[in-house]
Image (tube, rainbow, N blue to C red):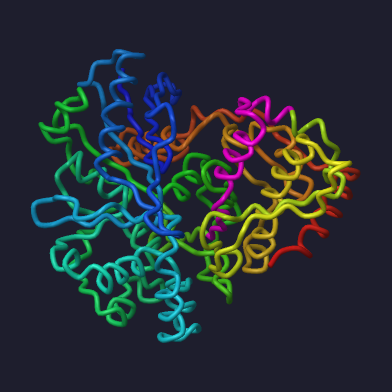
Amino acid sequence: MKYLLGYDLGSSSIKAALLDVATGRCVAAATSPAQEMEIAVPHPGWAEQDPGRWWQEVVNATAQLRAAYPFDAALLAGIGIAYQMHGLVLLDKEGRVLRPAIIWCDSRAVDIGNQAFEGLGEAFCLENFLNSPGNFTASKLKWVQDNEPAVYAQIHKMLLPGDYLAYRLTGRMQTTVSGLSEGVLWNFKRQAVAQELLDYYGLSADLLPEVVETFAVQGHLTADAARALGLAPGTPISYRAGDQPNNAFSLNVLRAGEVAATAGTSGVVYGLNETATADARSRVNSFVHVNSTPAAPKNGVLLCLNGTGSLNSWLRRLVGELPYDQLNALAAQAPVGALGLRFLPFGNGAERILENRPAAAALHGLQFNVHGRAHVARAAQEGIVFALNYGMDIMRAAGVRVQTVRAGRANMFLSPVFRTAFVNCGDVALELYDTDAAQGAARGAGLGAGVYASPAEAFSGLVRISTVEPTPVLQAQYQAAYADWKTLVP
């Protein structure tokens, strides 16, 4: 018997999943910490985390996993990593972290990216990078150069969060082409590092780590890491990908026209395209997908709604710390459209679908003698769906076919209100699967280590739980509410 281990490095927790290679089924899973990890906000619009805390929670999650399912570590055939995208981790020559990581929802570099978009030329950026430099990793590094020169002077390599976890496992500083693309550090047209943006910013390409394949043995578990995790030294690390490309991979989304969604910390829809297309206003973003090759390119077009998890968590606290299943039941007590109550689900940094502008959350149409807790709960869930559909409309205009969407049966897709609103507002079928990001990372490790010969073999154990289809009556109701909601979007 052989096993595969996947880690999902999120901004709220670390998840670990252990797969049985023969069946393709998850035999154990763990999450650490029990409460969400803190996000430091030194200034409004900033968001930072301590990479050392990520590593400690990886250690904790692995210990929980081994306690729940004591397996022979010598039978572990590969380790895969999924991680929160767009973050910036800075290491010196000794591998020490120089400052807290600037994570995905940090907005400090918005103006820097906007100036580069104008300075390099919008047409040039969209044609070559498929994105505005925006608030992505390259722009965050430029912010450090401009505002923390003493830190910048000590940088040996810049890493993404998953690259940092791989470094802690293997001692090697590396990244992938997909990872470079998520930092707007990749030129799609030239199939090379985005030297033009580095030159514009005055950044050295020497700060970029070695590039390795997404599916490949990228390194082996060091003796120190193995000791901390209770695993066997020499175990291969054989896959890494950002959370959204990996979420798509975990749902076997590997071909053009296939679409994945998630609604956890952020709300995301991610569709595959074989053509290098870009939204003229950079409201959705394109990244190199995990199975892309120069001969057969696959680009993931991503829309992201920052405030999904924050809104749901805020709402839960507001109504008295109800468990999420009870919060979902409360939302179901109100009718479709929440009697005219509309929620703009922003309020968590700069929103890409609003052209990278910060926006506040807002309730519209509130009437004290009409609306209660159930209406607010429903309006919040519908507002998230409406914002995601707003982004899907942009994706469709960019050439992505959005007809059937796959998602893991988790987070907000556990809510019947959310699922029903999603399919009827967007006129899409929704397929729900029994998987998650950590399981996807484990399957990726199996492919990278050669344990699985093909994606078909890797996904033989993937189970579809259900399919939700739109219905004409509900479509009319939700699309009328959506049309009203769109009039409120700033």
Depicted 291 relative to depicted 70: above or below: below
Along the line of sight, which residue is nearer the eye, 66 or 256? 66
Q: Give residue 299's position: percent from left, percent from top.
A: 48, 61
Residue 222 point in image, percent of width and height: 13, 35
**Which residue is depicted at the point 54% across and 71% down?**
282
Report x, y in % for residue 349: 51, 59
Query: What number of labels is visible?
Result: 0
What residue is drawn where x is 50% and y is 70%?
276
Q: Is residue 389 above or below residue 335?
A: below
Between residues 138 and 274, which one lies in front from this camera angle?
138
Q: Say whether residue 315 is magenta.
A: yes
Q: Is residue 251 left or right of residue 188?
A: right
| Residue shown at the point (57%, 38%) measured from the top left | 313
* Residue 336 makes an appearance in the image: yes
Q: Nearer the viewer, residue 207 or 28?
A: 207
Q: Which range of residues does the magenta coloring cover?
A: 301-329
Res 158 quadrant in image: bottom left
